Image: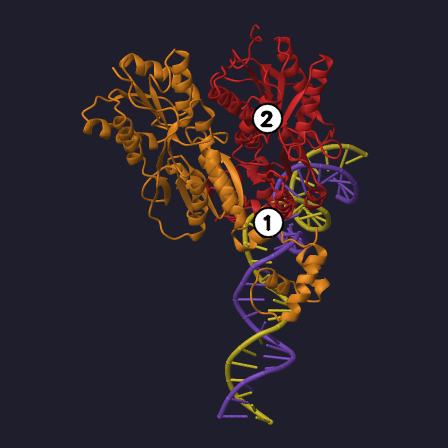
Chain colours: A orange, B red, C yellow, D purple
Amino acid sequence: MVTIRDVARYAGVSPATVSRVVNGLTGYSTSTQLRVEEAVLALNYEPDSLARGLKTKQSAVIGVLAPLVSDALASEIMSGVESAARSRGYSVMLGRTGLGSEHAAGYLRTLRTYRAAGVILISAAITADMRRALGSAIPLVSVAIRDGLRFPSLAIDDERAAYDGTRYLIGLGHRHIGLLAGDPQSVLVNTVRERGYLRAMAEAGLPAVLEQGNSLYDSAPPALGRLLRRDPLLTAVFALSDEMAAAVVNDLQRLGRRVPEDVSVLGFDNTRTARHVHPALSTIAQPLEKMGELAVERLLAGTDLRPRILPHRLVERGSTTQVPPG
Amino acid sequence: MVTIRDVARYAGVSPATVSRVVNGLTGYSTSTQLRVEEAVLALNYEPDSLARGLKTKQSAVIGVLAPLVSDALASEIMSGVESAARSRGYSVMLGRTGLGSEHAAGYLRTLRTYRAAGVILISAAITADMRRALGSAIPLVSVAIRDGLRFPSLAIDDERAAYDGTRYLIGLGHRHIGLLAGDPQSVLVNTVRERGYLRAMAEAGLPAVLEQGNSLYDSAPPALGRLLRRDPLLTAVFALSDEMAAAVVNDLQRLGRRVPEDVSVLGFDNTRTARHVHPALSTIAQPLEKMGELAVERLLAGTDLRPRILPHRLVERGSTTQVPPG
DNA sequence: CGATGTTTCGTAAACGTTTGCGCTGCCCAC
DNA sequence: GTGGGCAGCGCAAACGTTTACGAAACATCG
């Protein structure tokens, strides 16, 4: 392990000077800069991140916390985070908070012991526990959820997005539109999406039919069954995650209903899975990668605590169509 | 920020003693242990990871490097890594190496500056560059790929798995079986899977038909087209990733062929996406989560450099069936 | 030419831990 | 009663950086 002292010796200067040129500070002549740079190259020196962090009370790591690490939504956001972080010289530490955020506080604590530069919280509400664990030193930005006031957030306008999705279905002529919601206690975003749906239905004078899932694949079929029982005339279902939507189109086909001829299904998020289904899902797109990138940008900028609303967009694929005649 | 000194003062002992009880060493009486533990609780003390790592020349981070972070295969392995790591008190640092491993060496270098306890490399071949960047201090285990000799690896028997998959298709009566391979240069695992396919076909006296994709969704349709052109009588296609297999069933349906009635398709990996398609994919399952867990286990055990072969398993779902009569 | 400023650089003290070493008591055996 | 052994603990030095401070060298200007 080659240290700054070795470099200093090699270049015939003091460690302090090496530190200065390595960090691009001022206070050295061009000639010594050259000598130091040459020494760094020759010895293949790389500053020890731990020592540096200890001294500066700040390390170049960004924590990313998601309910599930193998979740498509979180994955794509993390992908954006990773690339933005790396291009700025930061590393990312990964943590799974669990569906109920059970492990979030613990992770925040360890991130603090690493003196992380910031943490990005995906799809999770911020509890008092978490605030305590975080302390005041580490900035946090919350993504894909609008938790309001204390922390900057980065999300689409979920109410409006759900409203727009529902309007779209209504515009297609549908009158019996069921909503497959996510679990409201774990992902608070779902309740505001529900509101958007309810508003659109109310405005159109249509009856709302709503069942809860938990955003995951397996929760959809039973919820779909309940939906169908409550309104057998359903011609459209709006699922609040692509994964549930995928399950819905598969289960519908299993039940002998054609998608989209008999019933249209609209997804949410536009994750990779939206294209894996056949017919491919029409869905409300969130700019997931971009959200990840912006999250690290905001984290490092530090300023501007206001929630930032990103544009959503309806992408039309094969799973939706005009209401069947009759 | 409360330090070990604060705790020591509070408990009326020296920092050294606090360190000893915090780390569970010996050399203190029960009564002082109690006092220290009380102080730790009272002050909510948590040792600084950076200082600790600096002193011990080892930090509790495990690096995980994957070609793509939003890839389903890598995601599920990472999920296993994360849970095993956390339960042992380790944190995981995430890195994207890129399809051609462009960024791998860079990441290894920064992991070294963090004095990571180890790194887990997913689906990537180990280059000389990477070996140099890694140095000798950090253990590495390679997952989902068998790179051979220098580093311990954790994978299924890919040749045998592909062989078994092909045999399964043959056993179903198929004679015209196309293989959709991954990109051999990026994921060397594909060439050994190809061998398994070729062996099974040769043994059965059947002609091999083989096209290259790159493991991702979009590469499949064109490759499928080429496959169909080369053998219009194809009744089965074996895709070397679930994502390609998903694309194949969708594209087949677009072309008016029914799956599995007209043509069977068999996937590989058994990722989440296998269930997202309709009909759900029959596929060769790798124990992905388990592989992630075992990887950290081996990393920390440190011993036993021999490659470890995990069992694969064929899971039959709706996308495969007997060859159509005629 | 002296005074004053400005570069350029080195010294040394920190950052928060861990750990080798040694000191103090105490117990016990002779 | 002396000595050896051992448990319990503190001192202080390290780990590899960064950075305040000051010293030297040099330029500038009256």
Percent across and percent down for residue B149 are 76, 32
In depth, the one of A278 and B151 nearer the eye is A278
Q: Are marks 2 and 1 in contact (CB under 8 Å)?
A: no
Amino acid bearing label 1? Leu
Q: Is residue A286 left or right of residue B85?
A: left
Amino acid bearing label 2? Arg
In the rendered image, which residue does mark 1 sit on? A50
In depth, the one of B162 and C12 nearer the eye is B162
In depth, the one of A201 and B59 nearer the eye is A201
Q: Quadrant of residue B234?
A: top right
Rendered position, A204 above or below B6:
above
Q: Residue at x 61, y 70 (%)?
A: A28
In the rendered image, which residue does mark 2 sit on? B226
Dot 1 alpha-carbon crowd within 10 angstroms: few under 14, some 14 to 19, many 20 or more = many
Q: Quadrant of residue B77?
A: top right
Chain for disc number 2: B
Q: Is residue B150 left or right of residue A69?
A: right
Q: Mark 2 or mark 1: which is in front? A: 2
Dot 2 alpha-carbon crowd within 10 angstroms: few under 14, some 14 to 19, many 20 or more = some
Percent across and percent down for residue A31 are 66, 70
Which SS class for mark 2? helix
Rendered position, B130 above or below B158:
below
Visible in this render: residue B91? yes
How many discs appear? 2
Percent across and percent down for residue A243 are 42, 25
Visible in this render: residue B272? no
